[in-house]
Structure formats: C-alpha cells, structure tokens
Amino acid sequence: MNIRFKPLKPTKNLVVFFDAKKHLLLPEDWPKEWTQAWKNYLKLPEIKGESSGVHRLFGELSERVYLVGLGKAPVMRELGAQLGKQLQQTEFSDLALALPSDRKHPISNGFEAFLEGFFLARYRYQEYKTKDQPKDQLKTLTLLAPKSKELESAGQKAWILAEATNEARDLCNRPGNLMTPTHLKAACQAMAKSVGLSFSALTETQMAKEGMGCLLGVSKGSEEPAFLNILQYKGGGAKAPTLMLVGKGLTFDAGGISLKPAANMHEMKFDMCGGAAVYGAMKIIAQLGPKVNVVALIPSSENLPSGSATKPGDILTACNGTTVEVQNTDAEGRLILADALAYGLKRFKPDAVVDIATLTGACVVALGHYHSGLQSSSESLAKQIEKASQQTGDPVWRMPHADIYDKDLDGTVSDLKNIGSKGAGMITAGLFLKRFVGKTPWAHIDIAGTAWGGDRIPFYPAQGASGTAVRLLAELAVHFKR
Ligand code: BES
Ligand code: MN
Ligand code: ZN
C-alpha cells in the first residue's frame, strides 16, 4: 500500500473522525472554512456522540466525506469494518484520512485496527463475475496529519494483515475445479517466492517412500495428485523457538465412498480453509519478520468416490507405522493431518504444534458459526492461542480435552479406527490427531463452523470464505513462547 502524508488538502474520498462530545478530530491548522458544514451536521440532535458510527456527507470540498463517530468505547476494527462495508461497492484508488495532530490521542492507537477492519470488510469475491469486474483498486492512502513513522507503519501493518487474509479468502472461494491440490501447491510456491519463504512439496512418489499411507489412502479415489506442501520461515537462530502449523488442504470433500448427501455438497470446496489460514499466516509472518522459526505443512488432496477409492473397512498405515481402519471415508481430514503431523514432528522437532482444519460437523453442532473449537494438551499454548484470538477478533472457545474418549478410537482389527462411537465428535477427532503428536505441546483448532458465512462478525464477509484464524495464527507466531 502506498502511504503518503499530505497536509491539509481536500480530496475525493475523505474520512474525518469525531469524538463522543461531537468534537471533530483534526490537525491543529485545519482551515476553519472547510469544517463549518461538518460542524453544522454534528449539531443535529439525532447525531448521538456516545455511540460510534459512520455518517456519509455530501460535501462541497470532497466528493465523499465520511464522518466517523468514535463514541464512548469504540471497537476500532469493527468501526473500520462499518466504513469498509459502506464502501464495498464504491470504487476508488485513493482514500484520505484526517487525523488529529496529537499523537497521544486514542485514535492513533486504534488506527491500525481501524484500517485492518476497513480493508477486511471491503473484500468481495468477484474473480468469475465477468460482467462485474472492479475497474479501480485502492492503491494509495493519504494521511492528512503531520508526518509520523508510527502512523505509517500502522497503515502498512494493517495492509499486510488484511491483504494476506483476503488472499487466503480468494484461495478458499475458488471452486474445486480451479483449486486442485496442484493449484494450491502453485499458490504456496508463488507466495513463498514473493515474500522470501522457503518452499518444498512432497509428491505422491515421495510420500509413498515416507510411508504416508493415510494421506495417500484419501487421495486414492481422485485423478488429481496429492501434495504435502512445506513452507519455512527462519526468523530466529537455533536457540529461538520453533512453532509448527499444520492446515487441512482438502480441495474438495465429496466424502469418498461414504458419500455426502447432495444438498450443500458444493460448500465442501471450503475444506481447504485450514490450509489457507496457514498460508495467509505464513505470508504475514514473513513480512512482519519476528524472531521465531515457523514451519508450516499443508497436506492437500481431494476426497472422491471412484473404483480406486479407499473403502470402508480398509486398513491404512501412517508414516509412523500406526495402522488405521477406515470405518468412514468421510472422516478423511484426520487421515491427511495424521501423516502430516507425524512427518513434521519427526523432521522439524518443533517446540509446539497447532493444527487447523474444517474437521467436523460435530464442531458446528456444538459451537455454531461464531467460535472456532479449540482443544489443547498444553495450558501455555492454549492461553497463547486465546490471547491471540482476543487480539485479532477471530473467536475461539476451548473444548474439554477429555482424554476419557481416547479409548473410543482403539481399533479391533487395527491400532486405531478413524471415527469414535458415542458423541463428542469434535473431541474424538482431536484425540485422533493427538495420537500422532506424542509429547509435543499441541493444539487443534476446528474451523468447520467459522471458515465461511461470517455474517456475525463485521469484518468477515457475509458469504463465502471468512479468512478466520489467518491473523490469529500470525499473531500467535509473532509472540510465540515455548
Ligand atoms: N470436511 C468435513 C467436516 C465438515 C462438515 C466441515 C460440515 C464443515 C461443515 C469432514 O471431512 C467430515 O466429513 N467429517 C465428518 C466426520 C464423521 C464421518 C465422523 C462429519 O463431521 O460428518
Ligand atoms: Mn469428510
Ligand atoms: Zn473434510
């Protein structure tokens, strides 16, 4: 994002803030003649200072003026999102924001969150709308304020966070025929190159050599080759902690031989949202440059029925030697994650691991569409995730760790079976993954209910991919402690 400072010149699209007392927050030397109309407007009794909100004025100086009332306790990301939603259909390349000269004013602190909410809420998915292509893209932010390094970096950071989230949303929204494992691999590779991450991907031949029978067993029914994508960020030295992120990159989940019902099956193109969250987080981490090491694994496959597909009752062997009876081919996410987890832990020896996936319908039943389900074997890691969740506004709710259900996964003809037996479907899915983790501090985030359709969160789009947990995972990595 191109950010420039320009003292006191009216522009086409101008944002001006006012406080709970209905005082305009402007640079000291702002010309009085421009503000009279705004002051008159604020005098109207229906404009309540105490509550925050966005008001559009038709000014003489600017084409569009937005008076943003901070209210008594503004939630800046949500306020930014309100403006973003209002300007969603409006095309422009340049937006100006007037800010008070007093850098200690709370608006300076909240400026980053405000812009983040604005950029996130303006997102729309239009790649395949041939008649509705946007002509203009926002390229320049003009800050009508005295030059300030802090404001400039706040603006840049907001853009980094939102742009990566919006890019992850694009990957998720793309349909299964245009976002196959091969496409996802190409996207990871291109992103890694653009921000200086190292990238590699295991092919099916390499996965077979590693003995990844679970991942390959899911991919068996599909004509599209599977991949295990690996992205690495090395921001700390050998002594810095290493965090491992693992995201489910199932580009389309028909259920396999245990075929899903037809209704809403098209939504299963979103079954790679966990992988996309990891993708977006890595893009942010690479640009923010924290002193930690992060390794990301995105196992990617389709889950389709065919003559070559894995059948219920088949036994697969994971790369750590564990045998799994597939009682339901639709419980495929845990299979591809199991091999990725076991392989990643052995190869990278991280201090902690977080996996993220659209894993269970049971999570949606338990928590609905606002909170993602969190499960963890480590108090410290769970706390770090909850803190990151509060910081970024991607809500999570911790579910009981409940080892009591673990024995439900014991197999009769194999070590494990891939489904539990009596309820607690989100928890048993998590516990299945934990069997492949060993003693490393581990957390699991189930985003089955939050990865798309985010109409309860102002900075998520009402339809399509929400981009949930992209910023959460990045925030977690930036502050990660072992
Ligand atoms: N990708 C689905 C989970 C899912 C369901 C995500 C609904 C979003 C909305 C997963 O692969 C799946 O099919 N899980 C099964 C597991 C079951 C067979 C134990 C489920 O939840 O029904
Ligand atoms: Mn499934
Ligand atoms: Zn799935």
Image: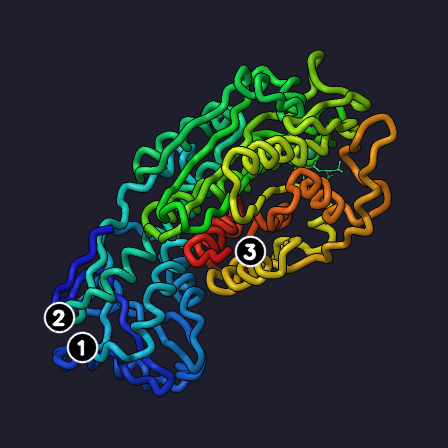
Disc nearer the start of the sequence (3/2): 2
Residue 86 in sight: no
Which quadrant of the frame does ligand 3 lie within?
Answer: top right
**Is residue 41 left or right of 370 when viewed as pictured?**
left
For the point 36% across and 55% down, the residue is 119
| Distance CA(mark 1)–CA(mark 3) | 36 Å
**Is 106 located above or below residue 96 in the figure?**
below
Query: The residue under label 3 is which amino acid type?
Result: Asp
Q: Position of residue 219 (x, y in %)?
A: 62, 21
Tell whether 330 sits left or right of 141: right
Q: Nearer the viewer, mark 1 or mark 3?
A: 1
Residue marked by disc 1: 27
Query: For this rendering, which residue is in front, 243 or 439?
Result: 439
Q: Which SS class for mark 2?
A: loop
Q: Mark 2 points at which residue?
A: 8
Residue positioned most to the front: 239
User: What's the residue type where badge 1 is placed?
Assistant: Pro
The residue nearer to you, when weighing 164 against 141, is: 164
Q: Distance between the residues labelled 3 and 2?
A: 37 Å
User: Which x, y percent locates residue 430?
Assistant: 69, 45
* Amino acid type at mark 2: Leu
Q: Are marks 1 and 3 in contact (CB under 8 Å)?
A: no
Q: Position of residue 436 (x, y in %)?
A: 67, 38
For label 3, the residue is 455
Of marks 1 and 3, which one's residue comes earlier in the chain? 1
Quarter occupied by residue 339 = top right
Q: Can residue 32 be seen in this view?
A: yes
Q: In this view, does 166 lie to the left or right of 402?
A: left
Q: Tell me: is circle 3 under 8 Å from ligand 1.
A: no
Q: How far apart are marks 1 and 2 (CA)?
A: 8 Å
State whether label 2 is within 8 Å of ligand 1.
no
Within-10-Å neighbours for mark 2: few <14, some 14–19, many 20+: some
